[in-house]
Amino acid sequence: MLHRLVLAVLLASAVAGVARAADTAPAAALRYHAVTSADGVLLNVVESGPPDAPPVLFVHGIGQSLLSWRRQFEGPLAGQLRLVALDLRGHGDSGKPATPESYREACRWAEDLRAVQRALGLMKPVVVAWSFGGLVAMHYVRCLGTRELGGLVLVATAAGRLVSPPAGPPSAGAVRAGAAAREMSSPDLRRNLAGARDFAALMTARQPDAAWEAESIAALLRLPAYVRRALGTGTLGPGGVPVTTNADLATRLDLPLMVIAGGRDALSDGRALAYAYRARFPAAQVIVYEEAGHSPFAESPARFDADLAGFVSARRAPPRAAD
């Protein structure tokens, strides 16, 4: 009973945080949509901002939700750009299929993003992909190419080994995150809760606001353990070919690229990540937020929003991978 009570309190706190956030913006500022993907999964989507402004499609990290981007949706950026975010399959209010292939096949994730594009009429959006979202963005590139994208912003992600920072022993944070992930994959809800608490503590170097931890834990608990287990069984590309790295996609990224990393990221070495991207994509815009952790957009929202708005406006030249 105790763990159920704790879970109820966490969820209630997260809901209250959402309600408080909604109170800070006009009632019509957020527009929700239910989009059906190619394989029938219902996707929860939200948008804000002028419908005729340049579109930006946000893709969250593992165990999180579209709520991760609320500082962008509630702030001045929503007055400049058309902001769209979805709950990925298995996450948040989106559908949670029981079959492992629903998560193993790269092209299903790619088709989810394309379904949102087509349902909302997003013409060449800039995709902002955070952490696991970077892997989803690479699934899109692998399965669908880049023709329908206007640019890519990778946040705190190696994008499924698109780049490989210099090898070294895993950090204490990475070891702790791995242990937390195993706890969240257990069929025991008490272990899920313990893992979610531990993982949420690693997502930032500093708390963005009072509601962040409760919202992050609630989101982590909405990703079922069976989905986590399916995600750990490998990835299949087009034709059922196993995919273990995305390094082969570097030469196909013929679109503007910006990379943002956190200098105090507990889950990976942000500076090493930035170095790897600069070496592989010399023309890309690569930025390290020295005081931020794994969630730069939430920890330094004003800077992130300014960098994103500038990138969308400039649409820098394609990165052209180095030889």
Image: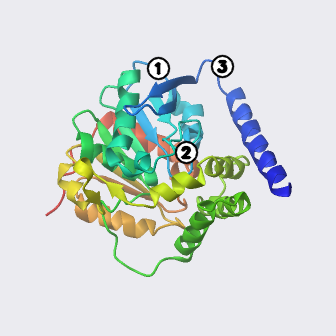
Say which quadrant the C terminus sits in: bottom left
Q: Which of the marked residues, 2 or 1, is nearer the chain's N terminus? A: 1
- Across and down, in percent, residue 203 comes to 58, 59
Given this view, does label 3 or label 2 mark the residue nearer the observer?
A: 3
Q: Residues within 10 Å of mark 3 (few under 14, many from 20)?
A: few
Mark 1 = which residue?
50
Residue 126 sits above or below residue 281 on the image: above
| In-front residue for pair 58/310 | 58
Given this view, does label 2 or label 1 mark the residue nearer the observer?
A: 1
Q: Which of the marked residues, 3 or 1, is nearer the chain's N terminus? A: 3
SS at badge 3: loop
Residue 233 sits above or below residue 124 on the image: below
Q: Residues within 10 Å of mark 2 (few under 14, many from 20)?
A: some
Please, what is the three-letter code of the amino acid marked with disc 1?
A: Pro
Say whether residue 233 is left or right of residue 15. left
Mark 3 = which residue?
27
The single residue placed furthest to the left in the displayed view is 323
**Mark-to-mark CA distance, 3 and 1:** 15 Å
Query: How many numbered discs, if any?
Result: 3
Please, what is the three-letter code of the amino acid marked with disc 3?
A: Ala
**Mark-to-mark CA distance, 2 and 1:** 20 Å
Please, what is the three-letter code of the amino acid marked with disc 2?
A: Pro
Give me the residue at 59% from left, 55% from top: 225
SS at badge 1: loop
| In-front residue for pair 104/9 | 104
SS at badge 2: helix
Give me the residue at 28% from left, 59% from top: 242
Mark 2 = which residue?
301
Residue 192 figure quarter: bottom right
